[in-house]
Amino acid sequence: MALRDASLRLASADFVALLGPSGCGKSTLLRLIAGLDQPDDGELVWDGGPPAPGDIGYVFQDATLLPWATAEENVFLPLRLRGVSRAAAMPAVTAALHRVGLAGFEKARSRQLSGGMRMRVSIARALVTKPRLLLMDEPFAALDEFTRHKLQADLLGVWRDAGCTVVFVTHSIYEAAFLARRIVLMTPRPGRIDREIASALVSGPETRLDPAYAALVAEISHGMAEALR
């Protein structure tokens, strides 16, 4: 059993971080929300009915790009699978790539891009359908610290512009504190939600030097220590 008694409510335009040790069911919970897995017990309830195609974007730990395709073609893929013509899709594809800072790299193939740039393409691909809900499974874990910090800041800008709800899986207390408005702490397997910590930070370039950020990191660290007991 990966999860037990896990109850989570998501609000419109929320940014929620799922934080916990390896194997606690964070990714399982994300897959349940996405409809990729079905619960053995319990249910998912959607206000206004189940999500329509394109309402949920998913960014995996690996960028999972088609290696032979250009950035533009990778981002076009979800629309192509929905039957949208290339001509009709290109404005949305170009806008998504520009939104993640890849203007000028539309024709670049995966092997020509850095790890951070490939992840940006993956995020653009998830955003191109204008989802109401964006699910992200440790997308920055394999990146160096400098690239990770840059992408965290850029992701907040994308979230504020897009107005979607984000659920972000992470092992990093510092990442959760910087990004999320709600930090959900999970216990070891079988995972359950131990507590939530609300954040009033409005993260920006100087946030990591802010005493309020340090205090939030300390609060999350203490809560996580309690959840792991």
Image: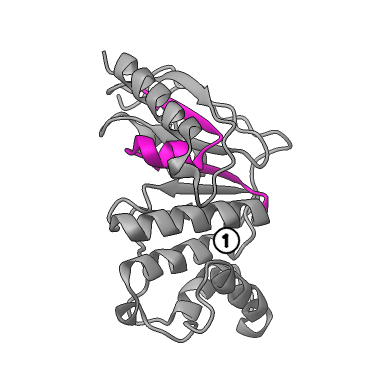
Residue at 46 percent of width and 32 percent of height: 211
The amino acid sitting under disc 1 is Leu
Residue 31 appears in the figure: no
On-image quarter of the N terminus: top left
Q: Quadrant of the C terminus?
A: top left
Could you say where residue 35 lies in the image, as x and y percent from the top left?
49, 43
The residue sitting at the right extreme is 48
Q: Nearer the viewer, residue 47 or 22?
A: 22
Point out the stretch of residues depicted in magenta: 163-186
Question: On the image, numbered disc 1 is attached to which residue?
Answer: 127
Relative to 86, residue 193 above or below: above
- Lateral position of residue 226 relative to residue 84, left or right: left
Q: Nearer the viewer, residue 3 or 125?
A: 125
The reply to whether residue 146 is in sight is: yes
The vertical placement of 7 against 123, above or below, is: above
Classify residue 13 as left or right of residue 77.
Answer: right
Residue 180 at x, y percent in the picture: 51, 38
Q: Residue at left 59%, top 56%?
A: 157
Q: Is 153 contained in the magenta span? A: no
Residue 172 lies in the magenta stretch = yes
Of residue 25 and residue 156, the one placed in the foreground of this image is 156
Residue 176 lies, in percent from the top left, at 43, 38
Residue depicted at x 74% and y 37%: 48
Q: Is 169 situated above or below 60?
A: above
Is disc 1 placed on a helix, strand or loop? helix
**Residue 200 located left or right of residue 183:** right
| Quarter location, residue 68 | bottom left
Q: Position of residue 128 (x, y in %)?
A: 59, 65
Crowding near the residue tagged with mark 1, few <14, some 14–19, many ≥20 C-alpha atoms within 10 Å: many
Q: What residue is shown at x 60% (from left), y 77% (from top)? A: 94
Question: Which of the 4 quarters of the picture holds residue 120?
Answer: bottom left
Task: Judge whether 28 appears above or below 188 on screen.
Answer: below
